[in-house]
Image (cartoon, rainbow, N blue to C red):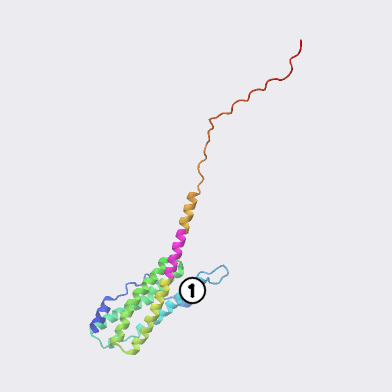
């Protein structure tokens, strides 16, 4: 069991680190596009709730990872070192990468690229976080493992929600692209053809003058 966990930790790293130097953004400070009436549109409300959940989950997970006492785990020194490295990588992701990606989506809610980057990061984070939680369950006390197990479950649900949003955005983009292509095709086919000059070779024949029918004067 120890060997399997060590290998899993060794191969698990959070590749998606902070894309920038952004700091954590409180969920309450998030604002999104509104409709003309001044209230958030249904899509903006759904996105607001989703990103608030992601931010809250990241903050809670960061707290739980920070509370780990990996140095006291009943594991070999190499396993402890690998777990500590994974924990540090996870915390950097939670504190820097997640808030930065949220801000990117906040700036451009309909950006497929921004939403997909968050989804991809959550997947990478899930893999490494799951390995750390498994190690906590194998080598650490129960009170350190249980919070991580809850965090992993929430993270799994959130990454599926973000995946659904990415799927919807991709479908909307495909529909818009098809509409634009149809519009271009319609415009091209609707071009007025060049006017044709019709030449009539059959010229109208001149009308014959009618013969005079007046009587001839008598001699």
Is residue 61 in view?
no
SS assignment at label 1: helix
Front-most of residues 166 and 38: 166
If the image is split into quadrants, where does the N terminus sit?
Answer: bottom left
Image point 48% across, 73% down: which residue?
A: 46
Is 31 above or below relative to 203? below
Name the residue beneath numbered marker 1. Answer: 46
The answer to which quarter of the image holds residue 145 is: bottom left
Q: Is residue 170 magenta?
A: yes
From the viewer's perspective, is residue 52 above or below residue 109? below
Q: Which region shows up in magenta?
A: 165-178
Q: Residues within 10 Å of mark 1 (few under 14, many from 20)?
A: few
**In magenta segment, residue 91:** no
- Between 116 and 212, which is closer to the camera in this rendering? 212
Q: Residue, x 27% and y 78% (percent of image)?
A: 8
Query: What is the magenta segment's predominant secondary structure?
Result: helix
The reply, left or right, for residue 192 in relation to residue 142 is right
């Amino acid at each position: 069991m120890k060997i399997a966990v060590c290998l899993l930790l060794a191969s698990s790293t959070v590749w998606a680190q902070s894309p920038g130097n952004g700091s954590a953004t409180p969920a309450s400070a998030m604002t999104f596009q509104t409709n003309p009436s001044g209230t958030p549109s249904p899509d903006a409300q759904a996105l607001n709730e989703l990103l608030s959940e992601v931010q809250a989950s990241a903050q809670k997970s960061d707290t739980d990872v920070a509370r780990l006492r990996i140095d006291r785990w009943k594991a070999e020194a190499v396993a402890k070192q690998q777990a500590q490295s994974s924990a540090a990588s996870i915390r950097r992701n939670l504190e820097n990468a997640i808030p930065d990606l949220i801000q990117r989506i906040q700036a451009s809610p309909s950006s497929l690229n921004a939403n997909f980057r968050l989804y991809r990061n959550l997947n990478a984070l899930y893999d490494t976080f799951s390995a750390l939680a498994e190690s906590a369950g194998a080598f650490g006390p129960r009170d350190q493992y249980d919070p991580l197990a809850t965090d992993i479950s929430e993270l799994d649900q959130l990454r599926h929600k973000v995946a659904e949003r990415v799927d919807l955005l991709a479908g909307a983009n495909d529909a818009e692209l098809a509409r634009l292509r149809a519009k271009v095709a319609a415009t091209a086919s609707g071009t007025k053809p060049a006017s044709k000059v019709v030449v009539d070779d059959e010229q109208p024949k001149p009308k014959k003058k009618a013969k005079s029918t007046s009587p001839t004067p008598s001699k």
